Image (cartoon, coloured by chain):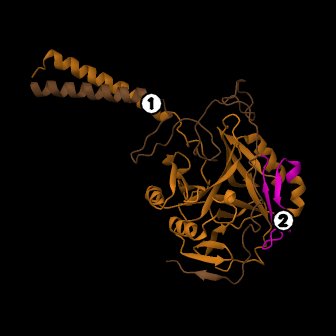
Chain colours: A brown, B orange
């Protein structure tokens, strides 16, 4: 009888733990077992593409290309494109034209 | 055998909690997760993967509407918005996507094309990338429609997605006008970067030129690595679109809000090629290519 009672207690505590863990998740955080946090909120930095794949926002009212969505305040204010000043780019660009070339051996 | 009352109560509560948990899990799994909105890289399930091949490009931009106006006006690309993701087509061919990410206020923002490279084992590659001095910026993560991938940066800081596409890589086709022709990585450290990508992409061969290395697999030129002197341009993957005449497009670039960084005639090795930015600052090369005359010689 003692064992059965302990088993019931074990189920109770285990169930409560998983329930609490489940309730804490809001669906935007996913933690893999390889210690990488896959998603943590929504930010944008000049490090383009840092947040890829992007967060899922089923209802983003600020999207100008999604008519029918209710008007709302953009989450981060209006977008102003501010090109980052750059010096002159490299002189040579693009896919090289085939020509006799020194071939590297794969090591 | 009858259980004591307390045990029965415990068992009842435990089953009730487990049911609640299962209900919670069902709700959780039915909500879309980040990345689930990304469309597949091909609608033709090939079931074939080509290691080291660039299979997709996504434009990360603060203004998707402006991007559609620019690229639609310049190349005639068309767009289909599915959820929060925009699929780009050139004619009938799906060639990429647009992801809008709003910037923080007053921050300097520019768009960027983000390439996806086919890699067989994403998890093993992610571990390897970190050992080689690269970084895992996000993932590995399984995206419902696209496959398993991770956002990485190489030791020079260039960002790239490594991807094992869910249904296989897109069928190989010769790029038409308005399709992706090429992709090259600009780096300050040519040797280190070549070694990094040669192993990451499993390239069997490389062809070295003047401050340039072509990455080859299965007899095909897959991508290039270019040495650049300017630090600010180091660590960027830059795609090239095949065009008929870059010179004719230049006026349209500026009219659509883009900038011309190098006009045709300013690149000694490719005098017919131009370097531009779109209206949100994403770098892009416009390059004519005659496949009959300029056959690859790997």
Q: Is residue B259 part of the magenta span, yes or no?
A: yes
Q: Can residue A95 be seen in this view?
A: yes
Query: In this picture, which residue range is highlighted in magenta?
Result: B253-279
Whether marks 1 and 2 lie on the same chain: no
Label 1, label 2: how far apart the Cα atoms are: 52 Å
Up-down relation of residue B99 to residue B177 (above or below): above
Q: Can residue B21 be seen in this view?
A: no
Horizontal side, residue B259 vs residue B161: left or right: right
Q: Is residue B15 left or right of residue A59?
A: left
Q: Disc 1 is attached to a residue of which chain?
A: A
Residue A86 lies in the magenta stretch: no
Residue B82 position, x and y percent, is 66, 40
Residue tagged 1 = A25
- Return the x and y of residue B232 as percentages of the image width and height: 68, 56
Residue under numbered circle 2: B244
Say which quarter of the image contains residue B263: bottom right
Q: Is mark 1 on a helix, strand or loop?
A: loop
Q: Which of B222 and B103 is in front in this view?
A: B103
Judge the density around disc 2: few (<14), some (14-19), many (≥20) Cα neighbours within 10 Å.
Answer: some
Q: Residue B4 carries which label?
A: none
């Amino acid at each position: 009888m003692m064992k059965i009672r302990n088993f019931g207690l074990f189920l109770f505590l285990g169930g409560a733990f998983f329930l609490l863990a489940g309730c804490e998740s809001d669906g935007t955080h996913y933690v893999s077992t390889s210690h990488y946090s896959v998603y943590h909120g929504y930010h944008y930095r000049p490090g383009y593409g840092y947040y890829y794949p992007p967060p899922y926002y089923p209802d983003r009212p600020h999207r100008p290309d999604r008519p029918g969505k209710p008007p709302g305040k953009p989450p981060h204010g209006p977008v102003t494109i501010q090109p980052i000043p750059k010096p002159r780019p490299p002189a040579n660009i693009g896919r090289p034209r085939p020509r006799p070339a020194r071939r590297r051996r794969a090591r | 055998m009858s259980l004591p009352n307390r045990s029965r109560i415990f068992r009842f509560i435990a089953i009730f909690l487990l049911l609640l948990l299962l209900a919670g899990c069902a709700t959780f799994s039915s909500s879309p997760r980040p990345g689930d909105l990304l469309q597949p890289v091909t609608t033709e399930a090939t079931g074939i993967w080509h290691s080291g091949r660039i299979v997709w490009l996504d434009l990360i931009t603060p203004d998707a509407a402006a991007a559609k106006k620019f690229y639609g006006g310049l190349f005639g690309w068309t767009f289909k918005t599915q959820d929060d993701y925009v699929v780009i087509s050139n004619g009938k061919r799906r060639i990429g996507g647009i992801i809008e990410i709003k910037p923080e206020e007053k921050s300097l923002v520019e768009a960027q094309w983000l390439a996806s490279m086919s890699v067989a084992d994403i998890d093993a590659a992610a571990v390897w990338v970190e050992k080689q001095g690269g970084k895992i910026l996000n993932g590995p993560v399984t995206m419902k429609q696209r496959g398993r991938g991770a956002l990485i940066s190489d030791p020079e800081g260039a960002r790239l997605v490594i991807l094992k596409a869910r249904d296989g890589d897109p069928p190989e086709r010769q790029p038409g006008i308005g399709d992706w022709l090429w992709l090259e990585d600009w780096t300050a450290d040519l040797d280190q970067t070549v070694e990094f990508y040669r192993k990451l992409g499993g390239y069997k061969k490389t062809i070295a030129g003047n401050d340039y290395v072509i990455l080859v697999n299965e007899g095909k030129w897959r991508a290039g690595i270019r040495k650049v002197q300017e630090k600010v341009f180091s660590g960027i993957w830059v795609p090239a679109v095949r065009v008929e005449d870059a010179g004719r497009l230049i006026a349209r670039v500026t009219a659509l809000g883009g900038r011309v960084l190098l006009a045709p005639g300013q690149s000694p090795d490719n005098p017919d090629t131009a370097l531009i930015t779109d209206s949100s600052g994403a770098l892009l090369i416009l390059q004519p290519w005659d496949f009959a005359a300029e056959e690859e010689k790997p």
